[in-house]
Amino acid sequence: MVLSPRMKWKVNRYSQGLHERLERIRNFFKSVTYKQKMCPACRALVDRNDRVCPFCGENTSAAPRGGATRVVSRVVPEQARYTTAILSINLVLYGLSLAASARRGGFDLNSLLGGIDPLTLVKLGAKYGPLIVDGDWWRFLTPIFLHGGIIHLAFNSIVLFDLGPAVEQIYGSHKYIVLYLLTGAAGFAVSFLWNPYSVSIGASGAVFGLIGAMIGYGQRHRSSFGESVKSMYVRWAIYGLIYGFIVPGVDNSAHLGGLGAGILFGFIVSDMPSITREQILFWKILRTIMIAAVIFGFVMLGMRQPQ
């Protein structure tokens, strides 16, 4: 078919316009992919070459300069920094708990599976009402990192490893650590009110807090995706609570406290990146306060050992 000069001109003009539109789309994706990246801490968009976020001051590089840290960065995803740190702390403190319990009464299979004696756990920071009333307020935070046996630790670690990175990526690491510690503390606060004389430990209250936050997240996003997220994590919560009621010795009051606090967090706190320096600074300060409170609590435990 032979095209007339006018038809050729229209085809060329259309092809040129299409090429320009495709080029603009390619340039847009290049700018997003190559020129910018998201800070894993505050979720602000920063230049691809920035190693430090200009908004929150956190390291944004996926491959730090040091050889050892470069290897770690390849193994640990950016969106799982705090989750990995929490899992590591839990493991180290469990090892210390096991060693301390063995010094008191010797090592046996029972202590490994879940029989670390309550006195050892109380000395290491477990929730215990009379000591909280006496001024040990940090016992709302320190028990989050303690576990009574390898099964207890393994169960919480598996759920946290599966759930934590997703929540950390959605909210950013600043909000994530605040969420984790606040809901964990809320769980032990409810446990203290429900049964103040029981010795209680474990990350499950904070884990339920993460589940609750995802339920709140699904409720905030009124869409088919939000409904599917909410439905999935409501089932998680139901399964976890049923397990807690079936298995003896599980502190379900801490689970309910953490879950309720997490749902409230998901309703109130937006998952959108902070858009002002003031918002970024607020979450950074709050994160620092929460971490400092945990460190202070463990330091005070060394200074105020119960007899």
Image (spheres, helix red, strand yellow):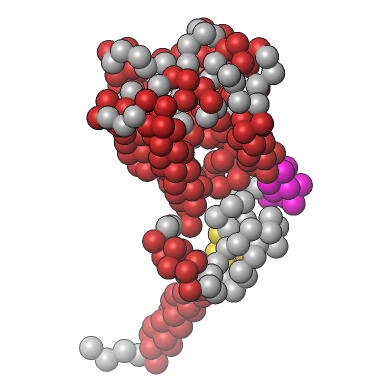
Residue 184: x and y in percent read 52, 27
- Please tell me which residue is depicted at 51% across the width and 22% down the height of the picture: 122
Q: What is the residue that sits farthest to the right in this orientation?
A: 278
150 lies above or below 21: above
169 lies above or below 213: below
Q: Nearer the viewer, residue 281 or 118?
A: 118
Hey, which quadrant is residue 179 in on the image? top right
Hey, which quadrant is residue 176 in on the image? top right
Q: Nearer the viewer, residue 162 or 38?
A: 162
Q: How many marks?
A: 0
Q: Which residues are magenta?
A: 275-286
In the image, 239: left or right of 195? left
26 lies above or below 77: below
- Please tell me which residue is depicted at 57% across the width and 71% down the height of the picture: 48
Q: Quadrant of the N terminus?
A: bottom left
Hey, which quadrant is residue 132 in on the image? top right
Residue 45: x and y in percent read 61, 60
Q: Nearer the viewer, residue 239 or 275?
A: 239
- Please tell me which residue is depicted at 27% across the width and 13% down the height of the picture: 246
Residue 212: x and y in percent read 46, 27
- Please tell me which residue is depicted at 54% across the width and 9% down the height of the picture: 196
User: Majority secondary structure of the magenta segment?
Assistant: helix
Q: Quadrant of the C terminus?
A: top right
In the image, 270: left or right of 243? right
Q: Is residue 97 visible?
A: no
Q: Is-magenta flag for residue 222?
A: no
